[in-house]
Amino acid sequence: MSKRKLTKQQAWRIERIQKERMERTQKRADRAEETLQSSDLGPETEGIIISHFGTQVEVEGTQEPNIGISTRCNMRANLGQLVTGDKVVWRPKQNEGGVVVARGDRDTLLQRPDMHGRLKPVAANIDFIVIVIAAEPVPHANLIDRYLVAAETVDIPPVILLNKCDLIDESNKEDLENLLSTYINLGYRVIRTSIKNEQGMSELHAFLQDRISVFVGQSGVGKSSLIGSLLPGIEISVGELSQKRKKGTHTTTTARLFHMPSGGDLIDSPGIREFGLWHISEEELLEGFVEFRPHLGYCKFRDCSHEQEPGCAIREALEKGGISAHRFESYLRIRQSIRDNDAF
Ligand SMILES: Nc1nc2c(ncn2[C@@H]2O[C@H](COP(=O)(O)OP(=O)(O)OP(=O)(O)O)[C@@H](O)[C@H]2O)c(=O)[nH]1
Ligand SMILES: [Mg+2]
Ligand SMILES: [Zn+2]
């Protein structure tokens, strides 16, 4: 991740955009308040956020008489950012729409910084993070490690899903197997699927049963395709890879929650290029690498940077093979990106 240096003009532009955004948020909140003051609102009822559309959210009722019914709602100003999976209290308007008036506590929250370093929630109240990679586009180990660190930091168990197994041949088999074996050795569960030949789909279905899972990963790996294949009949957009570079085309633009008829929820999320971890501390980063944990606190120097120092327990584990070179390198890269951002 590159360090972002802004010219005065860029900084001024960002400041202006932020000011405009704040004004818009305020106006929206005023509108929500106005509606609340008027009398055409129904009683408070519970719901869950299905999706977020900039100025509004889609809320599905979880209480009679609104169970399963979706309503576009404005939101009160003091709620902070609402996100897919949030449990809310809302009031229906007489004709259509409604207003969200409160948000329930979150059991879990996956979040990541946006381009400007502001922390954005991705999904709330999730039990599992399904990190989707594919035979094509080629997976980036560092991105997988970033997701794993994020999952470990918020204590939401991750699973790695290799999709498009129908596209595995002699040219990519070894690389993919090497990549996966690192994670299998660390104790992470790996599921292999293909929506073309149905491989692994029943295992995946069984795994997702009765849990709330969010599908994350690069664009084009097949997150939406997998959900569409698990839930035939739903409306979900799927996009071809770009012809030239065989990369995803960022088809899904906002997270959305779908119900499995047999129980459980699936949250589709937009593909990403980078997963910034600027919001976590260097200690959390170390803890986020599960195989580092048994060695933490055993370096000779308390402020060991795990680079050159004698008596470094992490490097010793690296030499003995308890920590793989690729994971250690990943750790150093992420640590550097956290430091670069600190300097900014
Ligand atoms: N061969 C093969 N192609 C697949 C498989 N799963 C998905 N695809 C194709 O991969 C492309 C991208 O699929 P999407 O489901 O849109 O990918 P996504 O991860 O949701 O991408 P974004 O929404 O951009 O993040 C589409 O052309 C799919 O048909 C699979 O198992 N095998
Ligand atoms: Mg998608
Ligand atoms: Zn050390």
Image (tube, rainbow, N blue to C red):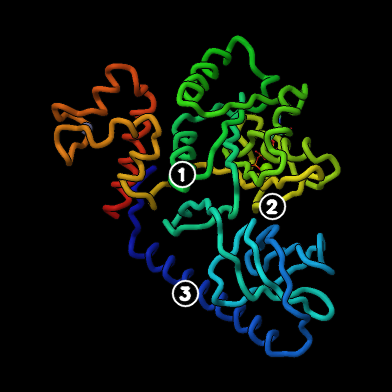
Q: Quadrant of residue 227?
A: top right
Q: Earlier in the sequence, mark 3 or mark 2?
A: 3
Disc 3 on helix, strand or loop?
helix
- 181 is higher (above) or lower (below) than 227: above
Disc 2 on helix, strand or loop?
strand
On the image, the x and y values in percent for residue 119 come to: 46, 58
Alpha carbon of mark 1 to alpha carbon of mark 2: how far?
Answer: 20 Å
Q: Quadrant of the C terminus?
A: bottom left
Mark 2 residue crowding within 10 angstroms, few (<14) / some (14–19) / many (20+) = many
Q: Residue at x 29, y 47 (%)?
A: 339
On the image, the x and y values in percent for residue 133 come to: 59, 31
Q: Earlier in the sequence, mark 1 or mark 2?
A: 1
Q: Which residue is mark 1?
A: 150
Quick check: is the Cβ at mark 1 less than 8 Å away from ligand 1? Answer: no
Alpha carbon of mark 3 to alpha carbon of mark 2: how far?
Answer: 28 Å
Q: Which residue is mark 2?
A: 256
On the image, the x and y values in percent for residue 242 come to: 65, 34
Q: Quadrant of residue 322?
A: top left
Front disc: 3 or 1: 1
Mark 3 residue crowding within 10 angstroms, few (<14) / some (14–19) / many (20+) = few
Q: Tell me if label 3 and label 1 are in contact, CB under 8 Å.
A: no
